[in-house]
Image (cartoon, rainbow, N blue to C red):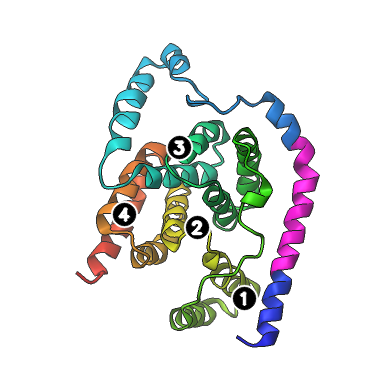
């Protein structure tokens, strides 16, 4: 990479850091107000099961027996993986009420604080800044209760993982050919920020980033983007059985319609991959 390109990438990352810091300052008062009224993280879902029983005994039953008692215990995904994809789905769908329980569960299931921090950062790009900032508000309280300090979290500008130059050059050329005359700014940021920066941050493994991305796409019904990222996930070490189980797990968190919209796309990806 030339010095000019490297300088441009550093300047861009610094600008993003400044913008994010300013945004956090502007909304810190709102976060403080929200933290006073939001239920404290605990060992039960925010919508407690006994509350669900008073409204819908059937929902409480399905939650206890099918979701927590069965789905979470299926063998093709570890509890840690299930936590990662559930957290990603909640952030993508802006479902803050359930975040305290599932953020805490993620930490209990072996997701490191730095990894949870990176999930939130990653989803700013794949689910939008507003959704990520809402997740920040929840994680801030949980990190405080666990005495997790900012200096324990991933650096704003760490040393990046090595770049697969050949694969990235092919991806960039394809996107440039398709959309370079439509939105050159998007094409440039996709290269400079997403694939030459975000995806190379070392504190969340590429396989985990793929799980987060695919889960967010399924959660938000973005089926057109699933083929590329599902293939990338499998290139990053997700097996077909695991990918299938991601879809099964998310049916309970994002709904059957989003799941069935995903199935034909996943079927095509599975059939086209080398055996």
Q: Could you tell me which residue is drawn at 75 percent across and 48 percent down?
A: 24
Please name the residue that numbered disc 4 is placed on: 243
Q: Relative to 198, say whether 86 is above or below.
A: above
Q: Contact, CB < 8 Å: mark 2 with mark 3?
A: no
Please name the residue that numbered disc 1 is placed on: 188
Residue farthest top in this picture: 54
**Nearest to N terminus: mark 2 or mark 1:** 1
Between disc 1 and disc 4, the foreground one is 4
Q: Could you tell me which residue is drawn at 29 percent across and 53 percent down?
A: 242
Please say whether residue 256 is visible from this viewpoint.
no
Please name the residue that numbered disc 3 is placed on: 108
**Nearest to N terminus: mark 2 or mark 3:** 3
Q: Is residue 3 left or right of residue 127?
A: right
Between disc 1 and disc 3, the foreground one is 3
**Nearest to N terminus: mark 1 or mark 3:** 3
Q: Which residues are magenta?
A: 13-30
Between disc 2 and disc 1, the foreground one is 2
Q: Could you tell me which residue is drawn at 56 percent across and 41 percent down?
A: 94
**Nearest to N terminus: mark 4 or mark 3:** 3
Measured Cα–Cα span from mark 1 to mark 4: 30 Å
Q: Contact, CB < 8 Å: mark 1 with mark 4?
A: no
SS state under label 3: helix
- Quadrant position of residue 40: top right
Q: Which quadrant of the rendered structure holds the N terminus?
A: bottom right
């Amino acid at each position: 990479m030339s010095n000019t390109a490297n300088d441009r990438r550093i300047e861009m990352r610094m600008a993003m850091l400044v913008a994010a810091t300013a945004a956090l300052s502007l909304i810190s008062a709102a976060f403080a107000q929200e933290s006073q009224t939001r239920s404290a993280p605990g060992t039960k879902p925010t919508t407690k099961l006994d509350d669900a029983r008073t409204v819908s005994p059937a929902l409480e039953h399905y939650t206890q027996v099918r979701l927590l008692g069965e789905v979470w215990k299926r063998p093709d995904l570890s509890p840690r993986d299930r936590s990662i994809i559930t957290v990603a789905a909640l952030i993508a769908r802006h479902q803050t009420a359930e975040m305290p329980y599932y953020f805490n569960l993620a930490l209990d299931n072996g997701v490191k604080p730095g990894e949870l921090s990176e999930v939130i950062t990653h989803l700013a790009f794949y689910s939008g800044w507003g959704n990520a900032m809402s997740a920040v508000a929840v994680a801030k309280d949980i990190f405080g209760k666990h005495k997790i300090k900012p200096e324990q979290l991933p650096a704003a500008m760490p040393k990046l993982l090595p770049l697969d130059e050949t694969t990235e050059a092919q991806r960039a050329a394809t996107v440039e050919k398709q959309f370079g005359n439509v939105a050159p700014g998007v094409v440039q940021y996709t290269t400079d920020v997403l694939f030459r920066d975000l995806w190379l941050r070392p504190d969340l493994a590429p396989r985990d980033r793929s799980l987060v991305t695919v889960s967010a796409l399924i959660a938000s019904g973005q089926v057109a983007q699933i083929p590329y990222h599902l293939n990338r996930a499998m290139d990053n070490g997700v097996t077909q059985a695991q990918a299938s189980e991601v879809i099964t797990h998310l049916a309970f968190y994002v709904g059957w319609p989003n799941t069935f919209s995903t199935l034909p796309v996943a079927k095509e990806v599975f059939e086209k991959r080398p055996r």
